[in-house]
Image (spheres, helix red, strand yellow):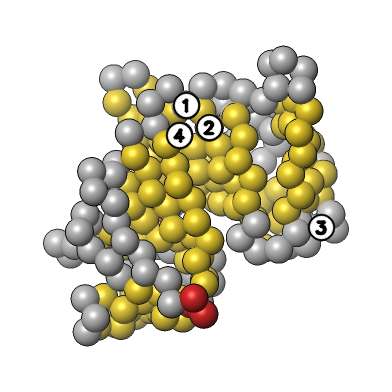
């Protein structure tokens, strides 16, 4: 089954396709992002998954109170330089697809592109009560995408066209940049392509 037109769902899975994503301006006004999935509660935004293009060097928007995982999707890479509230400096260098950086959204973070623009995936969770476990997945490793018990969200983001095995009987083809939301108790297997498995818990 090829799922590449509109949002799709059944009792165990939901699939969100790129044309369903919401286009939003960055907080700093220097670009735009595609909001893929977000969740709010009585205390505000709890987590958000989004995709963006970084086209020039610059300072990231401030998301104090959120923890960020940034995944390189395409391009020659970039270096992220962080300065925290205590004045301490750290650095991440992302050079290959699915390289990741994890940092506080309240850090003063500057991006320096290696050679031309890049695309990235951004997973943000509320630092006070929410955790994101983000894992690069490759079909060569026969990756099983097991949803966690009591997770707020278990999902797989395809950074290229992917094929997943559902219930050990049915193959689904996921369009590039799609999000497969996995219901609790399900364990699809990535058999072609690569992407990112995201598990968000309280």
Q: Quadrant of the C terminus?
A: top left
- Residue at (51, 28) in percent of width and height: 66
Q: Is residue 201 left or right of residue 118?
A: left
Task: Please tell me which of labels 3 and 1 falls first in the chain.
Answer: 3
Is disc 1 surrounded by few (<14), some (14 to 19) or many (20+) residues within 10 Å? some
Q: Are marks 3 and 4 in contact (CB under 8 Å)?
A: no
User: Which mark is in front, 3 or 1?
Assistant: 1
Horizontal and vertical percent position of residue 152? 29, 41
Q: Are marks 3 and 2 in contact (CB under 8 Å)?
A: no
Which residue is disc 1 drawn over?
127
Q: Is residue 83 left or right of residue 201?
A: right
Q: CA distance from mark 3 to mark 1?
A: 32 Å
Q: Quadrant of the N terminus?
A: bottom left
Q: Are marks 4 and 1 in contact (CB under 8 Å)?
A: yes
Task: Please tell me which of labels 4 and 2 falls first in the chain.
Answer: 2
Which residue is disc 3 drawn over?
116
Residue nearest the observer in this picture, 38 or 71 = 71
Q: Are marks 1 and 2 in contact (CB under 8 Å)?
A: yes
Which residue is disc 4 drawn over?
125
Horizontal and vertical percent position of residue 78? 77, 51
Horizontal and vertical percent position of residue 44? 37, 22
Which residue is disc 2 drawn over?
67
Q: CA distance from mark 1 to mark 2?
A: 5 Å
Q: CA distance from mark 3 to mark 2?
A: 26 Å
């Amino acid at each position: 089954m090829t799922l590449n037109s509109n949002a799709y769902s059944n009792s165990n899975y939901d699939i969100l396709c790129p044309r369903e994503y919401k286009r939003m301006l960055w907080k700093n006004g220097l670009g735009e992002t595609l909001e893929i999935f977000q969740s709010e509660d009585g205390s505000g935004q709890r987590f958000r998954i989004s995709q963006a293009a970084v086209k020039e060097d610059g300072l990231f928007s401030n998301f104090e109170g959120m923890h960020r995982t940034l995944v390189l999707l395409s391009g020659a890479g970039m270096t992220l330089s962080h300065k925290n509230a205590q004045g301490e400096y750290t650095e991440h260098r992302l050079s290959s697809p699915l390289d990741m950086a994890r940092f506080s959204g309240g850090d003063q973070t500057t991006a320096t592109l290696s050679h031309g623009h890049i695309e990235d995936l951004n997973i943000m969770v509320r630092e006070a009560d929410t955790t994101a476990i983000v894992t690069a997945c490759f079909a060569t490793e026969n990756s099983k995408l097991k949803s966690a018990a009591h997770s707020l969200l278990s999902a797989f983001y395809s950074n290229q066209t992917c094929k997943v095995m559902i219930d050990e009987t049915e193959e689904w083809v996921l369009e590039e940049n799609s999000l497969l939301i996995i219901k609790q108790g399900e364990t699809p297997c990535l058999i072609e392509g690569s992407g990112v498995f995201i598990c968000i818990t309280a």
